[in-house]
């Protein structure tokens, strides 16, 4: 089994023995950090939308989170 390391103190990062895993973009890194911080808990799409866009989500926010 391949070992993966996750880091959320400082910039969110993931790495394997082959090197770092690319996390493209600010929102992708935020989702990664939120999911890691809530490991073993269900994180709803709505709570991710709230965290990413606060009180001004675009009409496509839910779709963007799912993709």
Image (spheres, grey):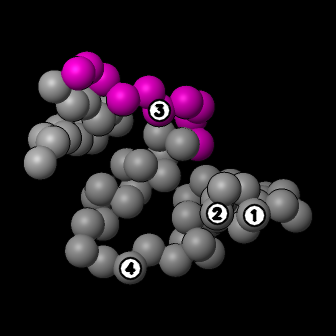
Q: Nearer the viewer, residue 52 or 63?
A: 63
Q: In the image, is residue 26 above or below residue 50?
A: above
Please tell me which residue is depicted at 41% across the width and 49% down the height of the picture.
32
Element at badge 3? loop
Distance from Cα at disc 1 to Cα at disc 3: 19 Å
Going by the image, does 27 lie left or right of 55? left
State if disc 1 and disc 2 touch (CB < 8 Å).
yes
- Relative horizontal placement of residue 16, taking residue 41 as reference (left or right): left
Mark 4 to mark 1: distance in Å? Answer: 18 Å
Quarter holding residue 65: bottom right
Q: Which residue is mark 3?
A: 23
Question: Where is residue 28 drawn, in percent x and y?
Answer: 54, 42
Residue 31: mark: none
Q: Quadrant of the C terminus?
A: bottom right
Residue placed under numbered mark 2 in the picture: 66
Tell me the residue that label 4 is attached to.
Answer: 42
Choose the circle earlier in sequence order: 4 or 1.
Answer: 4
Tags 3 and 4 in contact by the CB under 8 Å rule? Answer: no
Mark 2: few, some, or many residues within 10 Å (few <14, many ≥20)?
A: few
**Disc 4 secondary structure class:** loop
First-in-chain label (2 vs 4): 4
Vertical relation: 52 (above or below) 41 = above
Q: Which residues are magenta?
A: 18-27
Q: Earlier in the sequence, mark 3 or mark 4?
A: 3
Q: Is residue 46 left or right of residue 10?
A: right
Residue that label 1 marks: 63
The answer to whether residue 39 shows anywhere in this view is: yes
Q: Position of residue 11 (x, y in %)?
A: 35, 29
Instruction: Determine which quarter of the picture holds residue 49.
Output: bottom right
């Amino acid at each position: 089994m391949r070992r993966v390391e996750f880091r959320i103190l400082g910039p969110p990062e993931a790495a394997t023995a082959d090197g770092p895993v690319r996390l493209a973009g600010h929102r992708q890194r935020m989702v990664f950090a939120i999911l890691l911080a809530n490991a073993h808990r269900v994180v709803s799409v709505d709570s991710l939308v709230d965290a990413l866009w606060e009180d001004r989500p675009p009409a496509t926010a839910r779709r963007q989170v799912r993709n």
